Image (spheres, rainbow, N blue to C red):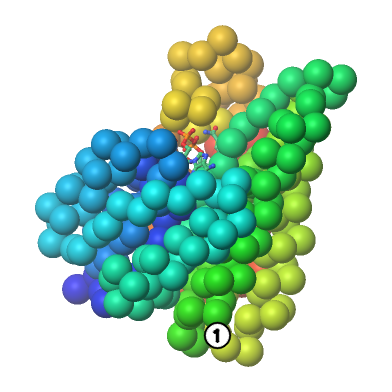
Amino acid sequence: QGILDGKVALVTGGSRGIGAATAVRLAREGADVAVGYVNGKEAAQDVVREVEALGRRAVALRADAARADEAAGVVDAAAAALGGFDILVNNAGVGVLGPLETLSLAEVDRVLHINVRGVFLASQAAAARMPDGGRIITIGSCMAERVPGPGGTLYTTSKAALAGLTKALARELGARGITANLVLPGPIDTDMNPADGPYAAGQAALTALGRFGTADEVASMVAHLAGATYVTGAEISVDGGHAA
Ligand code: NDP
């Protein structure tokens, strides 16, 4: 008997990294899972097979979070495919770092569209679909707590917006027992930020634990929040002490 038995979850960006680990973790707790992706069809289908091997239902859904219609529409597609909608994990995101003067308008629009507008629209669509007691869990970043150096203006702007969204969603939806929370990962070993990448040692050194985290270490917090009934509007660091 899992804590999420009978629940339906959508994990955006569920094909790789933190999202893939979260999809599998939610399935272990009993949820059926829609796995969002944009390019990684094969990877998303691998995650679907992993969820199915746990005895849960799963579907891979292509949706480009940069497109308003798809960012919202994937919620309806998940509900249609799996027959309900209880948990939204806003995980899809892009990390564009670089000196302020090099960031083009196209890059600014793209990052804000995926990391902020897409999250807003998916949350709006999910709130309209969810029964009382639903969950909205968003993946922010430790960079919104503490910016350790230059090059993070655009990414940090996008991730900081999620704090406002999360608190306001908690107030907006609390009367329905729907919770909204923000997880702030530190450096996590994924394609976006490999633990053997050129900037990895510096990032690990900024944490209290002196190491990168794993996608599973973030996924376990998301699963906890999916089951938690009296946590809302919270920002929870899973960052090895990056903000300490
Ligand atoms: P990855 O780059 O490993 O995976 C990104 C995921 O997002 C993929 O599933 C990808 O799909 C999907 N995605 C990317 N762009 C879009 C889009 N336009 N529409 C829909 N889906 C999209 O990233 P991580 O697992 O590292 O990151 C996941 C989240 O965690 C992000 O929001 C990131 O900002 C955040 N984060 C990560 C940290 C880290 O150190 N890794 C630290 C702090 C926060 P596809 O496979 O189809 O390309």
Query: Where's residue 230, x and y in %?
Result: 55, 77
Q: Secondary structure at mark 1?
A: loop
Residue at the top extreme, as displayed: 198
Find residue 156 and report its image quarter. top right
From what the image shows, is residue 1 above or below residue 185?
below
The residue beneath circle 1 is 177
Which residue appears at 12% of the width and 52% of the height?
53
Query: Where's residue 134, x and y in %?
Result: 48, 77
Q: Name the amino acid type tagged 1.
A: Gly
Q: How many marks?
A: 1
Classify 10 Å Cα crowding around label 1: few (below 14), some (14-19), many (20 and above): some
Query: Where's residue 67, x and y in %?
Result: 59, 50
Find residue 201 and report its image quarter. top right
Q: Quadrant of the N terminus?
A: bottom left
Which residue appears at 52% of the width and 56% of the height?
70
Residue at the right extreme, as displayed: 101
Find residue 96 and report its image quarter. top right
Which residue appears at 46% of the width and 14% of the height?
196
On screen, residue 3 versus residue 240, left or right, reads: left
Is residue 70 visible in this depiction of the protein?
yes
Which residue appears at 70% of the width and 25% of the height?
97
Query: Where's residue 64, x and y in %?
Result: 51, 47
From what the image shows, is residue 202 above or below residue 30?
above
From what the image shows, is residue 49 above or below residue 233?
above
Q: Quadrant of the C terminus?
A: top right
Is residue 226 visible in this depiction of the protein?
no
Closer-to-camera residue (178/239): 178
